[in-house]
Structures are given as structure tokens and as C-alpha cells.
Amino acid sequence: MNPRHRFIFRNTLPCHQGTPYFSISTTQRTVIDMTRQNALTPNGHVRARHAKPATTRSTSTSAEVGEVHANRYPKHEDPTKGQVYNGVCNTTACVGRRAVWLNRGTFGLYCTTCARGQNRYNEVPICILVDRKPTIAEMDAHHHAMMADMSALRKARHEQTTEPHFSNS
């Protein structure tokens, strides 16, 4: 028997008379525990050989978004997906038409259902309704407006939490 696989046959039932019986979860847990033990030092730090190399961020500007869209999203077979006004939604799993909502962070166009899903839990709307595909300058203006709204909201929240509370006692 291969010594690396001996942990698989650890769980045998007496009724099977030596026939190996193992649970997938037990096997997976054992392998994960062994990997975790090897990856961490006694202090809990990740060993150098298990550290992943840092990925460098691309230095693309918002002006290059149109040219690199197909490379950024390889699952999109159509390079114009999410980039044509009133076309197909930018969400990979969505084939909805009528993409008229602009995401101010990714500059992609989304259908109404996906845009509402993105805006649902955000106090500052990420997607806004547009009447045409914006130019690069307009996309930048939309993005800066969104960031200004977010920082104003954060500032207002911070001022609410730091107000002094006076009692009438």
C-alpha cells in the first residue's frame, strides 16, 4: 500500500471485514489539515514557499476600457457585451437585452434587473439610467460624482457619530 494513501483506509467498518470504507468529508478534511499544517509556521504565519506572488494591477485608464473589455472578461464570447447601448447586459450569466443602465465603477451597461440588484444594498446608486452610451469624459464625470456622493455620505455618518450628547440633568 502506498504510505501516502494510508489515511484513506483508516476508517474501516467491522461488518465489511477489512473492506475500506471512508467518508469523502473525512478524507478531504485530513488532506486540508495536512496542507494547512505544512503551510503555517508555529506562530501562524504563512511559510515563504506557500506564499503566493503578488499580482500587479494593470495601469489601464478609463479611456482604454473599450479596447480591453474582451480581454478582461474572457467568458464573454461577444466583445460588445455590455458595451453597446440597448444591447446585451454586461453580466456574464445574463442574456437580457436593453442594457440602458451604466455602472459608474466598471463603465459597463446593464439590464434593469441586474442594475437594480447592484443598487439594492447601496445608499449611493452604482448604476444610473442613461439615454445613450456616454463618452469617456462623461464616464469619468459620472465616476467622480459617485465618489463625491460616497465621501459626502461617509462624512455625514462620521459627523453623526461624533456629535456631543448633552443631558438635561
Image (spheres, rainbow, N blue to C red):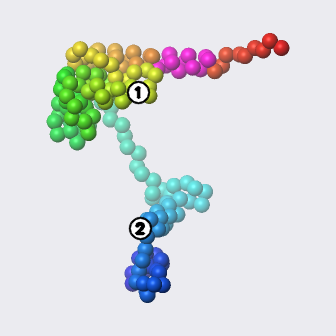
In the image, residue 116 sits, relative to residue 163, either above or below, namely: below
Q: Residue furthest front?
A: 15
Instruction: State the image quarter where residue 160 is shown.
Output: top right
In the image, residue 149 sits, relative to residue 110, either above or below, namely: above
Q: Residue furthest top?
A: 168
| Mark positioned earlier in the residue sequence (1 or 2) | 2
The residue located at (83%, 14%) in the rendering is 169
In the image, residue 127 sits, relative to residue 169, either above or below, namely: below
Percent coordinates x, y for residue 165 in the rendering: 72, 16
| Label drawn at residue 120 | 1
C-beta proximity under 8 Å, tags 1 and 2 = no
- The reply to whether residue 6 is visible in this rendering is no
Instruction: State the image quarter where residue 6 is shown.
Output: bottom left
Per the model, the C-alpha gap separating discs 1 and 2 is: 39 Å
| Label drawn at residue 24 | 2
State yes or no: residue 159 in magenta: yes
Q: Residue furthest right?
A: 169
Magenta residues span 150-160
- Depth check: give the residue in front, 66 or 107: 107
Kind of residue at disc 1: Arg
Q: Is residue 37 left or right of residue 75?
A: right
Q: Quadrant of the N terminus?
A: bottom left
